[in-house]
Amino acid sequence: MSELKTVHRSRARAAPRALGKRGDGAFCTLDSRGMALAAKGAVPLAGVVDERFSFVPLTRQEREACDSCVSTSAASCIQLMPNHMLTETGEISGFCFRSTGAEKVSTIPMDKNIFGTTAVYECVSGRHSKGYISIVNSLEATQSRLQALVKELEGCEHHLNFECMHDWTNSTNVSDQRVWNDALPSKMGVYHCFMRTNAQNEREHKIFLVVSGNCRHASEELHKLWLDAREDITIAQFMECGEVVWLRQATLRWLNRVAWRMMHALELSSNAVVTDYEAVGARVSMLIPTHFTVYNDMAINPVTNEFVMTNNAALLQKAGSGVIFDCFSSEGFWIFHGPRDTSSYKIFGSDFSATKDCYAFPTQTVRYHALHTCKKAQSQVSLPRSSKVDVKKSTTCLYGESKALYTGFMFPDSSFIQQLEKLGFSYNNGITNLMPIVMYCGDE
């Protein structure tokens, strides 16, 4: 497919959709070709919609949502990932957005779920399957312990918000202003997999804890801050705010704390660390993540002043290793490995190679619902579930929703993976499938 068909420039709209209601968007600076096209245009032009990496053709609703995201700035570009879809509220999801830091911050479609992260923690259980055997032999007890932890986290009173942020005027004090409790994440559970060692000479059976989600209260406060200041400051000034820097770090600390509590509740072992800088007078325990992926991210290059935002996609320049891909609750997580790493202990490989054409990599498969139906039936996995699954009737998942939010999901088959290879992944590097043993899911 030619570039003329896969990259088009959106015409400026007379009445763009309200910024506060836009979805997880991402913008991008224009290249010389795009600026030349804009100079020849007969009417005012907005940003670029790049469809080169889309897996299926965009629907009319998806195209309108993309045009809305770039309609307020000619220096913006939204690049569709292979996992692009419409959300249940009709917003576009699965993309990378680039712009310049000199633009007003009102031009970015700020997401309320910003800095959502998925973290994995390897459990220490001796060689091969000792940890798995101990869990499976007492699976019912493991389910009961996890359900008790879910109820405990649901009763969180002191949520993580900007009142907890440390004093930025004092460089020696990095403690939070007040104590906060751990809230319930979107997903958490125990997973297992078979994977090769770094030496590539044998396969090992490993146990992992996985925790995924975003700090809901703090993220909503950052969204309100963006609403208040969006017409007064630039993107670069917004990215320099202490709240932005703090929230990205605090999200991972929260997941690490939840992971430690899950490890303790399920009587597992991992590499834990005790720290005393969480809050004045409070010491908390947390786990060190084996790897993590921020799936709703944003960053700015201080040299080039280029701003990048992702939705359900990871920034490759910040990935550090492989990319964690959320398939579905019943399928588990896939981890797409980077090139084999022999210089340090990165079990999921080294960094992916980001290029000028692609900055991001998908982190979630496509979910199907009433507003976004399946276009390729051969890759669809249907979900007949219509009511809440009781812990005694399920051997794997504890669902937080009383009714299924989706009718199915797209299984990432070979044609989908071939599309991912255009984004920097090599099939020779391998894919690890983290299969759920027992887990909680609150977003499906």
Image (spheres, helix red, strand yellow):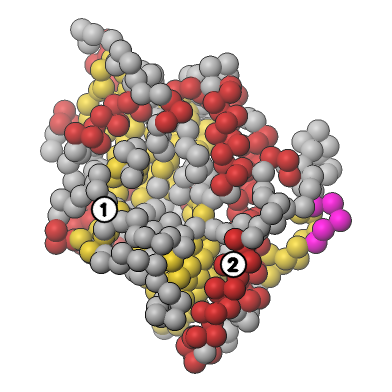
Is disc 1 placed on a helix, strand or loop?
strand
* Position of residue 378 in the picture relative to residue 384 (left or right): left
The image quadrant that residue 149 belongs to is: bottom right
Q: Position of residue 39 (x, y in %)?
A: 27, 10
**Residue 268 falls inside the magenta stretch:** no
Q: Is residue 19 above or below residue 218?
A: above
- Would you call the spot at circle 2 few (<14 residues within 10 Å), some (14-19), or many (20 or more)? few
Q: Is residue 377 above or below residue 29?
A: below
Q: Is residue 81 above or below residue 363?
A: above
Question: Which residue carries the number 1 mark?
Answer: 368
Where, quadrant-wise, is the N terminus in this rendering? top left
Front in this rendered view, residue 179 or 166: 179
- Residue 426 visible from this viewpoint: yes
* Position of residue 143 in the picture relative to residue 75 (left or right): right
The image quadrant that residue 169 belongs to is: top right
Q: Position of residue 144 (x, y in %)?
A: 55, 80
The residue mark sitting in front, 2 or 1, is: 2
